[in-house]
Image (cartoon, helix red, strand yellow):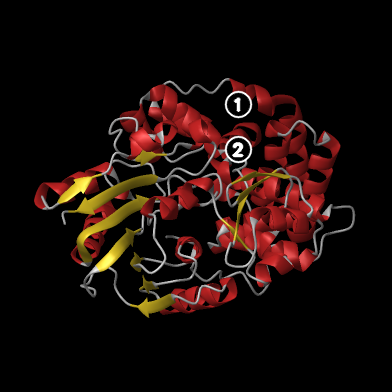
């Protein structure tokens, strides 16, 4: 259910948000501004990127490079800072913020990108620093010249045998590395962390209330392959700036997220309760699957997000959606045919597409599991006998996923579990195969947990 929602305190200027300096590519100027806004202003990377790209009027090719540079730098910042401190002999905490941003951006290019000329990575990073911190430009130049010779070797020497080593080598907080070593085993944990640092699969869902996937593909004229109502993109595409977005023809949404609504399997005429519904990707998908016949009560606690959800439903033509501003953990009306419980989670399945999420402290599993259980109980109480409930999260965390469902079933014998692993064996959970757990390194989509429960008739 989560989307970036906090106000970006850097939206109205500063932090590298001026025009690109002479001799600096717009894509690098954009990435530099995004990196500064994330680490200095607390901005969400995707929102910062969208705003900077629109301000600089990036074309699709420049947007693709800006996305790779900014997301990659944010994702790999722990490893980058290790290289910077090693080569500069200084703590990153003591560097001027513009200098540190320019160094991070330059070291990322020199260490991880093969097609970027070293002279461009060094020279343009120096120019960015020179504009905002002129006295630090010499340091940026000296460190990046060393990085061109030594950075890859430094990174290649990093081991990932233990969770602590893997956290540095793959640039994750240690608590995430430890969690995945314990839950998945070392080989899968390492592969998952490596996948988090690669570009996420880009997918659009065609809004079948207004178009079809083949029609949308023809209209967009981009390289993509079809998978049901999904377009899996080969090209960069700024969906939120497109006319098709404004017309409600598409929704950026991962294949894992799309599976949630499909597995709830709503039918035309059903009464559906969608808890923690914003930003509305799953809500509007439910409406499309129902052919806009029936009723969807979409509950969202935050008034601003609820208003945004109403606008999304209107844009997508999902007229059966009735948005209620309220607490999903509180009692709801009874006798819904289907209930979707998609509670707040730690977002650990979306670290490739939400590069800053790993560095935020608010989403620890232990702080969320009790709330998730409360929302699941509230949703179950609203379900009619014989009805279907789907519990889903976009995380990879036993405490938020299978343990929540198991604790619920232990006190609610009137509910039984559907065997989703038999239906979708490629996505079955590694230890509880009746549930699903998509894994980015295995399935090339966001990491979603999905359990389907039925209430006895």
From the image, tell me which residue sits under label 1.
Answer: 155
Give me the residue at 89% from left, 57% from top.
Answer: 22
User: Would you place residue 391 above or below residue 116 in this image?
Assistant: below
Circle 1/circle 2 CB separation < 8 Å: no
Q: Secondary structure at mark 1?
A: helix
Which of these two is toward me, 151 or 414? Answer: 414
Q: Which mark is residue 74?
A: none
From the image, tell me which residue sits under label 2.
Answer: 198
User: Would you place residue 262 above or below residue 170 in this image?
Assistant: below
Residue 11, given in percent of the width and then of the height, sits at: 63, 71
User: Would you place residue 272 above or below residue 229 in this image?
Assistant: below
On the question of residue 91 being in view, the answer is no
Q: Secondary structure at mark 2?
A: loop
Horizontal arrangement in the rendering, residue 48 relative to residue 260 (left or right): right
Q: Residues within 10 Å of mark 2 (few under 14, many from 20)?
A: some
Residue 40, given in percent of the width and then of the height, sits at: 57, 60
Which of these two is toward me, 49 or 226? Answer: 226
């Amino acid at each position: 259910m989560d989307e970036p929602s906090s106000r970006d305190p850097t939206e109205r200027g500063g932090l590298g948000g001026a025009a690109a300096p002479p001799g600096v590519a717009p894509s690098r100027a954009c990435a530099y501004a995004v990196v500064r806004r994330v680490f200095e202003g607390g901005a969400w990377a995707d929102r910062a990127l969208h705003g900077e790209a629109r301000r600089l009027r990036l074309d699709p090719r420049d947007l693709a490079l800006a996305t790779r540079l900014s997301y990659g730098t944010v994702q790999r910042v722990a490893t980058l800072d290790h290289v910077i401190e090693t080569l500069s002999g200084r703590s990153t905490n003591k560097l001027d913020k513009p200098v540190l941003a320019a160094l991070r951006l330059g070291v990322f290019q020199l260490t991880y990108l093969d097609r970027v000329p070293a002279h461009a990575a060094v020279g343009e990073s120096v120019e960015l620093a020179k504009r905002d911190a002129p006295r630090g430009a010499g340091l940026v130049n000296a460190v990046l010249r060393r990085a061109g010779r030594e950075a890859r070797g430094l990174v290649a020497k990093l081991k990932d045998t233990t969770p602590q080593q893997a956290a540095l080598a793959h640039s994750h907080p240690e608590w995430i590395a430890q969690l995945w070593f314990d839950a998945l085993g070392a080989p899968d944990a390492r592969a998952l962390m490596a996948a988090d640092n690669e570009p996420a699969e880009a997918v659009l869902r065609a809004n079948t209330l207004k178009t079809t996937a083949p029609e949308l593909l023809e209209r967009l004229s981009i390289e993509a392959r079809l998978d049901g109502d999904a377009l899996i993109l080969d090209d960069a595409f700024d969906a939120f700036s497109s006319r098709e977005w404004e017309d409600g023809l598409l929704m950026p949404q991962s294949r894992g997220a799309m599976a949630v609504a499909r597995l709830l399997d709503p039918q035309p005429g059903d009464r559906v309760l969608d808890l923690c519904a914003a930003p509305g990707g799953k809500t509007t998908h439910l409406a499309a699957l129902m052919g806009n016949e029936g009723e969807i009560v979409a509950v969202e606690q935050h008034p601003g997000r609820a208003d945004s959800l109403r606008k999304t439903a209107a844009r997508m033509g999902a007229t059966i959606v009735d948005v209620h501003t309220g607490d999903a953990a509180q009692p709801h009306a009874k006798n819904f045919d289907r209930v979707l419980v998609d509670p707040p989670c730690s977002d650990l399945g979306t670290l490739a597409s939400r590069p800053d999420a790993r560095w935020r402290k608010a989403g620890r599993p232990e702080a969320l599991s009790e709330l998730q259980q409360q929302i699941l109980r509230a949703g179950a109480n609203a379900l009619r006998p014989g009805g279907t409930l789907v519990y889903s999260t976009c995380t990879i965390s036993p405490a938020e996923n299978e343990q929540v469902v198991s604790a619920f079933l232990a006190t609610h014998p009137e509910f039984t579990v559907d065997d989703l692993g038999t239906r979708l064996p490629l996505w079955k959970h590694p230890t509880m195969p009746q549930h699903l757990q998509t894994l980015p390194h295995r399935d090339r989509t966001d990491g979603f947990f999905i359990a389907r429960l039925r209430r006895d008739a």
